[in-house]
Amino acid sequence: MLFRFDLPSRIPLFPLTGAVLMPRARIPLHVFEPRYLQMLDDTLKTDHRLIGLIQPEGAEATGGLAAIGCAGRVVSFSETDDGRQMISLRAISRFRLIEAKQGFTPYLVGEVDWSSFTRDLRENENDPAMDREALFALLRRYMAAHDLSTDWDAAAEAQDEALINSLSMVLPFSPGDRQALLESPTLADRRELLQGLIEFALHGGDNEERLQ
């Protein structure tokens, strides 16, 4: 993956419970708090236009934020009549949060380390060991049990990474489960964890109690 910018050592942080951005995925966000509107304005003035999406309630050493988040580049934004912003972030790379600081800005800025996630800067991952038929059978049971629906034709045509990352981001897992999926080192690891979470839920497990 080629950029016209260097990955910075400091990026603005957008803490959001239950929201994770997987490698090479996109996420829409609704920005309305004044401090985050200021963050967006400041971000759009940079070359990289990166925002670090990260979950709160992490260790005290990282300012109550998760140790790992994912930085996304602002690729689109539109303003509503009442001044709110609808933006889209395209994932660039996960990062490890070294320190979160409240400086001269009304939002947090993180000192980050990218070195553990060079895989994110490469081309899409594949998962040759994935059994789509078994995954879809499991997913259909899960969808029916939770009264959910999806576009099965689009899912069948999706590439391995797009399919697994999309499911990891949209299925109604707990924040802890979502964080574990984000931190999975490889696509195969994420797919195995995803299947395990689905199977656990189908057997009556309570993910929130288990991982919170």
Image (tube, rainbow, N blue to C red):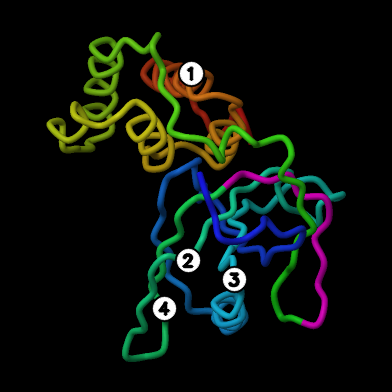
The single residue placed furthest to the left in the displayed view is 153
Residue 44 falls within the magenta-colored stretch: no
The disc, 3 or 4, on the residue closer to the chain's N-terminal end is 3
**Going 74% across and 81% down the picture, which residue do you hit?**
105
Q: What residue type is disc 1 on?
A: Ala
Where's residue 50, x and y in %?
A: 58, 63
* Mark in the foreground, 3 or 1: 3
- Decide whether the magenta segment is chiefly helix, strand or loop: strand
Q: CA distance from mark 3 to mark 4?
A: 20 Å
The answer to the question of whether label 4 and label 1 lie on touching residues, with beta carbons closer than 8 A, is no
The disc, 1 or 2, on the residue closer to the chain's N-terminal end is 2
Residue 101 falls within the magenta-colored stretch: yes
Q: Which residue is mark 4?
A: 85
In the picture, the disc for residue 74 is 2
Secondary element at tag 2: strand
Image: 34 above or below 67: below
Q: What residue type is disc 4 on?
A: Gln
Where's residue 48, x and y in %?
A: 59, 65
The disc, 3 or 1, on the residue closer to the chain's N-terminal end is 3
Image: 7 above or below 185: below
Q: Which residue is mark 3?
A: 47
* Mark in the foreground, 2 or 3: 3
Q: What residue type is disc 2 on?
A: Val
The answer to the question of whether label 2 and label 4 lie on touching residues, with beta carbons closer than 8 A, is no
Q: Which residue is mark 1?
A: 188
Image: 138 above or below 210: above
The answer to the question of whether label 3 and label 4 lie on touching residues, with beta carbons closer than 8 A, is no
Secondary element at tag 4: strand
**Quarter placement of the C terminus:** top right
